[in-house]
Amino acid sequence: MIVGWQPLSLIKRGFSVRRSSLRKRRQGRVKKVTELSTLCDIECGIVIYTKNEEEPIVWSSREEMEQLLRKFNKIPEVERMKK
């Protein structure tokens, strides 16, 4: 649970601190997507690109994400916008 909201600001302490902060946030995002997929019984995934890594971080798997994106792109844009 979130204790308190903190405004976003640039981390000035160094590159390694920024990298570790990014890694923690990335792990948190992947955990949230995993929970969303499990609790809501939906197909979902996450793709994260970073400057430091050539390949994107993909959850659940690259093949499943490609299939999910193909399925999403087949849906007409009008249908995508519906709530």
Image (spheres, helix red, strand yellow):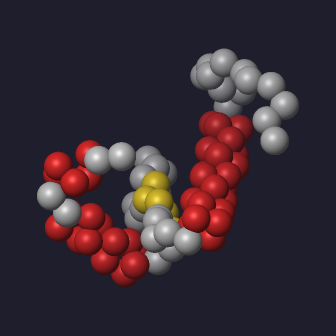
Q: Toward the viewer: 47 or 14?
A: 47
User: Image check: 50 left or right of 8?
Assistant: left
Quadrant occupied by the N terminus: top right
Image coords of residue 11 (percent x, y)? 66, 26
Q: Is residue 14 above or below residue 34?
A: above
Q: Number of labelled discs?
A: 0
Q: Residue at x 46, y 77 (%)?
A: 61
Is residue 19 visible in the rendered image? The answer is no
Q: Toward the viewer: 13 or 78?
A: 78
Q: Which residue, as the protein is rendered here, is positioned at the far bottom?
A: 63
Image coords of residue 57 (percent x, y)? 48, 63
Q: Residue at x 26, y 71 (%)?
A: 71
Image coords of residue 18 (percent x, y)? 64, 37
Q: Residue at x 80, y 25 (%)?
A: 4
Q: Which residue, as the protein is rendered here, is positioned at the far front?
A: 83
Is residue 10 visible in the rendered image? The answer is yes
Q: Toward the viewer: 31 or 77?
A: 77
Q: Residue 9 appears in which quarter of the rendering?
A: top right
Q: Residue at x 72, y 21 (%)?
A: 6
User: Image check: 22 left or right of 77?
Assistant: right
Q: Is residue 12 above or below residue 33?
A: above
Q: Which residue, as the protein is rendered here, is positioned at the far right?
A: 3
